[in-house]
Amino acid sequence: MGFEMPEGSNAPSAAFGINSADEELIEESRYQHVKSGSVAVPRPSEHPPRFSFKTLWAYTGPGWLMSIAYLDPGNIESDLQAGAIAGYRLLWVLLWSTIAGLFFQVLCARLGVTNGRHLAQVCREAYGRPAKLTLWIMMEIAIIASDVQGTYAGQFVMEGFLRLRLAPWKRVALTRSLAMIPTVVISVVTNKDILNLMFEWMNVLQSFQLPFALFPLLHFVSVRGIMGARRLKGALLYLAWTVCVFLFGINTYLLIDTLQQYATTWYYIVLVVLVVVPYLGFTVYVIIGPLLPVGGMAHFYEMCLPPVNAYLHDDDDESLEPGHMSDDEGVPLLA
């Protein structure tokens, strides 16, 4: 016995019991977009959407951009040199570092998708002026020490922390000049060993910036007033904090061990103290400040940043006003 389709209807509509009104709603939702910068991201629909390469392509850009960070010539050369020196003994480090990187990238995506703000914007609204300016300087230093994808990230950092908007060519000229001009000068007036030493310190410097991005991220994704039902909690929250504290311990050891090599005279010791003490002090402030009942971040976990787009609230609770989130269990990006 064959399967006969009802007259006047198409196959998918008849098979799933979708009437013409529902079809119009689905079709209309496919063309609703939420503007994020200059990229149009399709608005999610409560109905199962049809597969579309156009929709897939809208989400491909961020993933493609992040993959470049792992495939640029500098990283490939580092991998080749590490393999030539250590063989296969460091493969476990590569595996777990990749997993950890993916985990925190998913948390960043979770923050942005749920609240409509990226990390720099939330930092601007949550921290006081001294803290957010310090974080901005740290992030700009890391961007200057990075590669091409850092230039693109510079726009988010400038807009997020300072609401500073620059034309693309001005942004590229500024960030790349701050990176290339010192490199060219050192290349001309010194030898190759000094240049290699500078590159080594640039890589070390980027690792020192990790706590200033990871710890604020963990606090933000745990705040109900920011994430609503999709806040991080339970075993995943403890896992994230464990990984962050572990990375902070490694970076602290690397910082002290590296600077000890130069602490041979009294002025070098003073320089080491002037670098290590503020670094550790500000890092501890970022970590425990929101957890203390006193201080500038005493009410950190009580703040509320409604989503910038009304549709980002919890759709399961129809009694909610747009921009308010319930504490009912939603569907998080990372469950």
Image: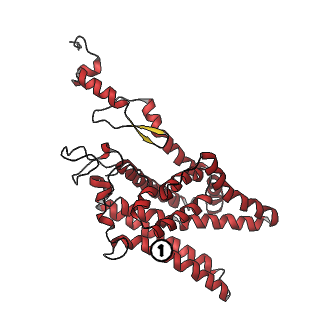
Q: Position of residue 301 (x, y in %)?
A: 31, 65
Q: Height in image: 264 above or below 289?
A: below
Work out whether residue 184 or residue 167 is closer to the camera in this orientation and state it.
Answer: 167
Camera sees residue 107: yes
Image coordinates of residue 148 in percent, x first then y, are 62, 50
Give the left or right position of residue 161, taking residue 275 as reference. left
Quarter of the image where the N terminus is located: top left
- Residue lying farthest to the left in this orientation: 319
Residue 306, position as x, y percentages in the image: 32, 53
Q: Quadrant of residue 267?
A: bottom right
Q: Is residue 70 visible?
A: no
Question: How many C-alpha atoms fall within 10 Å of the one at disc 1: few (<14), some, or many (≥20)?
Answer: some
Q: In the rendered image, which quarter is residue 186 located in?
A: bottom right
207 to 8, vertically: above or below: below
Q: Secondary structure at mark 1?
A: helix
Q: Identify which residue is drawn at 76% across, 59% down.
A: 184
Q: How many marks?
A: 1
From the viewer's side, name the closer residue of 87 and 2: 2
Residue at which label 1 appears: 282
- 216 on left or right of 292: right
User: Nearest the camera: 291 or 321?
Assistant: 321
- The residue depicted at 28 percent of the width and 24 percent of the height is 23
Residue found at x 28% / y 33%: 47
Decide: is 238 above or below 166: below
Amino acid type, residue under disc 1 in the picture: Phe
Q: Is residue 283 left or right of residue 154?
A: left
What scheme was used to colour the molecule?
secondary structure
Q: Residue 111: horizontal and vertical position, in percent?
A: 38, 53
Which residue ends up furthest to the top in the rendered image? 7
